[in-house]
Amino acid sequence: MKTIKIEKLGEEELRRRGVHDWPVWTCGISRFDWHYDTSEECYILEGRVIVETDRGSVEIGRGDFVTFPQGLSCVWDIKEPVRKHYNFP
């Protein structure tokens, strides 16, 4: 089962994981298909996105720490421009 995991992490945990040293990705309001060939962790700095999967939709936004599993196919519907730190563990 390919499910998206959304967490709220405190600043101490973000520092412990080195999140603020990860690269930053940005994208304006748009809608596109995406497939995860590998798992991805990301921390949303700004924006709002609805991620649509075959199991339903989830909304992610500022302050969310999100893990996308390998093999997930989805649609990113970016409602507000996004800035996120990202990592491929």
Image (cartoon, rainbow, N blue to C red):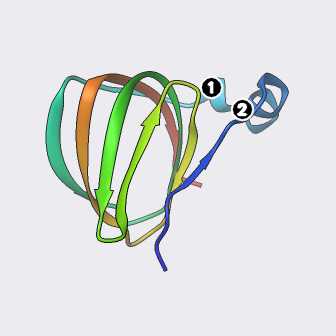
Q: Identify which amino acid the numbered label 1 is placed on.
A: Asp
Q: Residue at x 32, y 42 (%)?
A: 50
**Residue 89 in which image quadrant:** bottom right
User: In the rendering, which numbered label is found on residue 1?
Assistant: none
Query: Residue 80 vs residue 65: left or right?
Result: left
Q: Are marks 1 and 2 in contact (CB under 8 Å)?
A: yes
Task: Please say if 37 is above or below 76.
Answer: below
Nearer the observer, 28 or 62: 62
Please name the residue shown 25% across and 33% down the image: 78
Q: Which residue is mark 1?
A: 21
Within-10-Å neighbours for mark 1: few <14, some 14–19, many 20+: few
Q: Please report the residue visible at 68 percent of the width from the left and 36 percent of the height from the top.
A: 8
Q: Quadrant of residue 83?
A: top left
- The amino acid type found where label 2 is placed reads Gly
Query: In the rendering, which numbered label is found on residue 18?
Result: 2
Q: Is residue 52 left or right of residue 3?
A: left
Counting from the top left corner in percent of width and height, residue 54 is at 29, 71
* Image spot of residue 31 (x, y percent): 15, 41
